[in-house]
Image (tube, grey):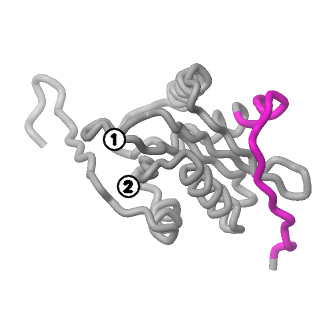
């Protein structure tokens, strides 16, 4: 049985940027569906673009999870990004990551519950996120915390010119 953790969550500060970037880069490829052909380098570059986008927004709030003072995960929340279809206010989880050795120990759940409280504080009626269909563990966590599928992104591969239809 794993040792009991002393988990806390706090707002991230400038001193946490290196950890957040490092963990985000380490987990970037895990967020990509198996339908998409993507190199680790391209996934890492996409994460860097996301970080830049989030850091430029006034409504970005980042939380850091710690176990006995050591960072073990983070979540980046956008509070100023309305729903793309209805244009109604919402919170949007731009990225969430937990160190592999701390997964399954309540870190992600604690981060999600912190996001719920922050969203409530901002009077935001919904929290949205995107998760790969290839990540059943994360999907189960989100569903257990009250998230439901609202829209489904469906993807089809397009065969290269000159190849048969598949």
The answer to the question of whether label 2 and label 1 lie on touching residues, with beta carbons closer than 8 A, is no
In this view of the protein, which residue sits in the foreground, 161 or 53?
53
In the image, residue 84 lies at what x, y percent? 30, 36
Q: Can residue 42 be seen? A: yes
- SS for tag 1? loop
Q: Can residue 41 be seen? A: no
In the image, residue 124 lies at what x, y percent? 47, 48
Label at residue 88:
1
* Number of dots carrying numbers: 2
Residue 28 in the image: above or below residue 112: above
In this view of the protein, which residue sits in the foreground, 146 or 42?
146
Left or right of 135? Residue 102 is right
Disc 1: CA contacts within 10 A as few (<14), some (14-19) or many (>=20): few
Tell me the quarter of the picture where residue 103 sits.
Answer: bottom right
Residue placed farthest to the right in the image?
68
Q: Name the residue under label 2.
A: 133
Q: What stretch is highlighted in magenta?
A: 2-20
Q: What is the CA distance from the residue labelled 2 to the residue labelled 1? A: 26 Å
Left or right of 14? Residue 147 is left
Label at residue 156:
none
Q: Residue at x 66, y 67 (%)?
A: 104
In the image, residue 92 lies at what x, y percent? 47, 43
Q: Residue at x 26, y 40 (%)?
A: 86
In this view of the protein, which residue sits in the foreground, 117 or 32?
117
Q: Residue at x 13, y 43 (%)?
A: 166
Left or right of 10? Residue 47 is left
Residue 74 in the image: above or below residue 117: above
Disc 2: CA contacts within 10 A as few (<14), some (14-19) or many (>=20): some
């Amino acid at each position: 049985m794993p040792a009991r953790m002393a988990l806390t969550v706090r707002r991230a500060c400038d001193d946490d940027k290196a950890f957040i970037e490092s963990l985000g880069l380490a987990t970037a490829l895990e967020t990509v569906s198996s339908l998409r052909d993507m190199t680790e380098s391209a996934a890492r570059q996409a994460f860097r673009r996301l970080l830049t986008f989030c850091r430029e927004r006034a409504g970005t709030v980042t939380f850091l999870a710690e176990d006995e003072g050591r960072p073990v995960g983070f979540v980046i929340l956008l509070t100023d990004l309305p729903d793309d279809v209805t244009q109604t206010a919402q919170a949007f989880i731009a990225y969430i990551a937990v160190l592999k050795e701390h997964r399954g120990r309540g870190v992600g759940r604690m981060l999600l519950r912190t996001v719920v409280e922050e969203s409530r504080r901002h009077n935001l009626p919904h929290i949205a996120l995107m998760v790969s269909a290839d990540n059943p563990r994360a999907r189960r966590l989100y569903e257990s915390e009250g998230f439901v599928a609202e829209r489904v992104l469906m993807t089809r591969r397009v065969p290269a010119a000159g190849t048969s239809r598949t």
